[in-house]
Structures are given as C-alpha cells and as structure tokens.
Amino acid sequence: MKSYLAPIIILFSLVITIAGCSSTKQTNDPVSTAQTDDTAEEWIKVNINEAIYFHFEKEDSVWAGTFRTYTLNDENEKVVNQQYVSANDSSWSDFQQFVDFLNIYEIGPQYEIEEWVPDSGTLPRRVYNFEVFDGENTHSFSYQDPINGIRDYWQAQNLLTFMTLVESDLQWVESTSEP
C-alpha cells in the first residue's frame, strides 16, 4: 500500500510547487466563462492561501473556469497578478466525471472527520477553502495541509486528486482582460 502513495505525494508536492505553470497560451480573445453564479447549474470555488483562486461553473451542461493568482502591490494591497480562463479544448470534457467520481459535493469540513487531529504545533502551509453548489445545495469546507491526511482519509485524497487534475491536466489560457 505504501509503495504507490509515495509517488503520489511526491507528484502532488511538485504540482503544488509549480502551481499555475501548466500549459498556458496567451491570447487577446479569452474564452468566456459563465457570467454569474445565478445562471450556473453547478459551481465550485476554491481559494488556496488567499493567493490562488479557482472558480468553475457549469452552464448548459458545459464546465468552464477562471484561475487567478494574487500578489501584494507596493501599498500592501492584494491585487490580481495573473488571470487564466479555461481553454476551449478536450481537457475539460471529463471535468464532470471527475467531480462526480471524487465526490466533491460530498466532502465535509476537515474538523468533522473523526480522529483527524490537526498539527497545532505548526502554522498550516496550505489552506484550501471550498464553496460548492450542486444545483440544489450550497456548502463550504476547509482543509489545512490535507497532505498530512492523504493516507488515512478519503476526503483528503479526493481533495488533493481534484487539485492535481485542476493544476496539471486542465488547459488554461492566459487572459488579457481586466478581472
């Protein structure tokens, strides 16, 4: 069992390190995403350390997304550093199957998992805040350093697998429009 987890953990750590460096192309004609949450059939929002933000929306049975990275300007204000939109390609065709297979809408908050004890001796390095809407219900959940629970908890495994898909397998196109 341990033999296959080590490569997954190493791969995920590498993916996190190079987050946002997946295949991208610059364009002056960004692919549009759904305009508002009100028109979306389903949506998923992910915020990582208040510095990386993903927003996925399903409209007319088609998923699209935006991906932003933030930085601090000279006045210490949080500003958009880079913005990407989903590429109009086949990498997005299986997004719904991944959402369903990984039970993204079923994941609850980390603190509700029995026997999960956070490492209170250190500050978290990665905090994932999710907000999801499955077409009927909206709920939020948060995980601090889920990599620490990847061997024992399906929720951590599924969350990190989802993020690996998002960061490594989906194609993003750099947006030149203002956020």
Image (cartoon, helix red, strand yellow):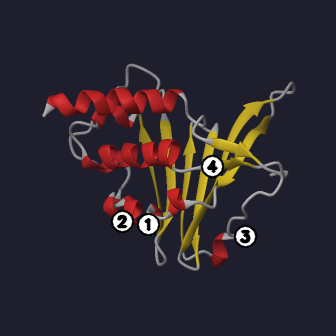
Disc 1 target residue = 96
Sequence-wise first label, 3 or 4: 3
Residue 59 in the image, given as x and y percentages of width and height: 60, 75
Q: What's the CA distance linking mark 2 and mark 4?
A: 22 Å
The secondary structure type at the circle numbered 1 is helix
- Tell whether 156 sits left or right of 90: left
The tally of labels here is: 4
Disc 4 target residue = 172
Residue 140 in the image, given as x and y percentages of width and height: 48, 57
Instruction: Kindly check if marks 2 and 1 are in contact, taking CB atoms under 8 A apart as contact.
Output: yes
Residue with the most extreme top position: 121
Sequence-wise first label, 3 or 2: 3
- Tell whether 137 sits left or right of 46: left
* Figure check: 66 above or below 33: above
Task: Look at the image and tell me in which quarter the N terminus lies.
Answer: top left
Q: What's the amino acid at mark 3?
A: Gln
Q: What's the CA distance linking mark 3 and mark 1?
A: 19 Å
The secondary structure type at the circle numbered 2 is helix
Q: Residue at x 33, y 49 (%)?
A: 158
Q: Nearer the viewer, mark 1 or mark 4?
A: 4
